[in-house]
């Protein structure tokens, strides 16, 4: 009886410690969200989403150009990183024993640990200096470089989870190795890969340092990829470090919009993942 009681007590203590750990992990996140929402909601209005920044010293204006600029920069980064990352992950998973796969894996792990400001300086050296121009393309290269190792390693790990029987079945039916990978293995891991891409987008959405060296900033609308482009992160940084109270207020609003964009992307990724899983089971 005493031994059973001790086991139950130990189990309850372990569960309680796990619950406390969860609370400790969630409380800072909840506090940050509460603080950003409470400060930023006061500055949100229609002008914030439809107008561009006003000249220094004036009040009002908005960050419409920065919101669109961030979306375009993230889109350019994804356009570059998603194909490279997925195909790199496929190679590392399906040809894991080769020296090249080991080298690519090591490079991805190393690149994943490089500070973002170093990647910004790298993009500055290979894109900005040769053309003597800050640009949206340079910002997209910097963000895409940050996305590649995340997508590659995520794709590799997910493909390793696909049962080998699927590969063997496709090969037994006469499919080539490449066809088996593209038509059987990759679709089986697609929901997780999409989630990994969204996580990579969330990773770069809040980056400021690389964009200071590449896309820089712009007070006006810009859709030309060869010109400097505004972004939410740089605009928030500029406003937050200014001496103007109205700019501080808008910086909080920009932070709220940035967090909301990341949250919406995460929700959409979950919805898409569940639908793909249902389609896969139904098929």
Image (cartoon, grey):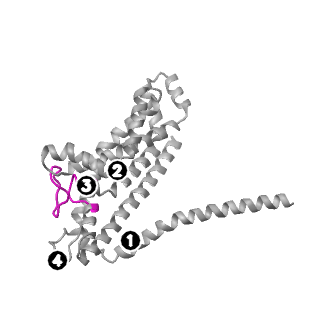
Dot 4: element: loop
Disc 1 from disc 3: Cα separation? 23 Å
Select label 2 or label 3 by which is in front: 2
Q: Is residue 154 above or below residue 61?
A: above
First in sequence, mark 2 or 4: give its number: 4
Instruction: Look at 15% across and 49% down and name the residue there.
Output: 226
- Secondary structure mostly taken by the magenta-highlighted segment of the chain: loop
In the figure, residue 98 lies in which quadrant? top left
First in sequence, mark 2 or 3: give its number: 2
- Quadrant where the N terminus sits is bottom right
Q: Which residue is mark 4?
A: 58
First in sequence, mark 1 or 4: give its number: 1
Select label 2 or label 4 by which is in front: 2
Select label 1 or label 2 by which is in front: 2
Q: Which residue is mark 1?
A: 36
In the figure, residue 12 lies in which quadrant? bottom right
- Magenta stretch? 210-233
Q: Position of residue 86 (x, y in %)?
A: 38, 39
Disc 2 from disc 4: Cα separation? 36 Å
Crowd tier of the residue under label 1, counting other residues whose Cα lies within 10 Å: few below 14, some 14–19, many 20 or above: some
Q: Which residue is mark 3?
A: 211
Instruction: Look at 32% across and 71% down and name the residue there.
Output: 252
Q: Which mark is residue 115?
A: 2
Q: Are marks 2 and 4 in contact (CB under 8 Å)?
A: no
Instruction: Look at 38% across and 35% down and name the residue there.
Output: 88
Dot 3: element: helix
């Amino acid at each position: 009886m005493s031994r059973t009681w001790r086991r139950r007590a130990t189990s309850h203590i372990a569960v309680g410690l796990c619950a406390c750990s969860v609370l400790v992990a969630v409380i800072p996140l909840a506090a940050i969200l509460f603080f950003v929402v409470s400060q930023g909601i006061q500055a949100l209005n229609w002008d914030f989403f439809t107008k561009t920044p006003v000249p220094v010293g004036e009040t009002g204006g908005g960050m419409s150009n920065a919101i669109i600029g961030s979306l375009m920069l993230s889109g350019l980064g994804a356009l570059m990183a998603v194909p490279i990352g997925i195909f790199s992950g496929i190679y590392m998973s399906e040809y894991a024993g080769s020296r090249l796969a080991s080298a690519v894996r090591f490079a991805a792990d190393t690149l994943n640990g490089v500070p973002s400001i170093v990647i910004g300086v790298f993009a500055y050296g290979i894109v900005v200096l040769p053309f003597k121009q800050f640009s949206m393309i340079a910002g997209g290269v910097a963000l895409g470089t940050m996305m590649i190792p995340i997508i590659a390693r995520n794709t590799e790990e997910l493909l390793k989870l696909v049962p080998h029987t699927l590969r063997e079945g496709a090969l037994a039916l006469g499919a080539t190795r490449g066809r088996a990978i593209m038509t059987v293995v990759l679709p089986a891991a697609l929901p997780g890969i999409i989630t990994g891409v969204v996580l990579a987008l969330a990773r770069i959405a809040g980056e400021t340092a690389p964009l200071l060296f590449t896309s820089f900033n712009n007070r006006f609308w810009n859709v030309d990829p060869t010109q400097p482009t505004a972004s939410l992160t740089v605009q928030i940084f500029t406003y937050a470090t200014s001496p103007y109270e109205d700019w501080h207020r808008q910086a909080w609003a920009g932070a709220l919009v940035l967090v909301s964009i990341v949250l919406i992307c995460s929700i959409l990724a979950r919805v898409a993942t569940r639908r793909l899983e249902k389609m896969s089971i139904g098929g």
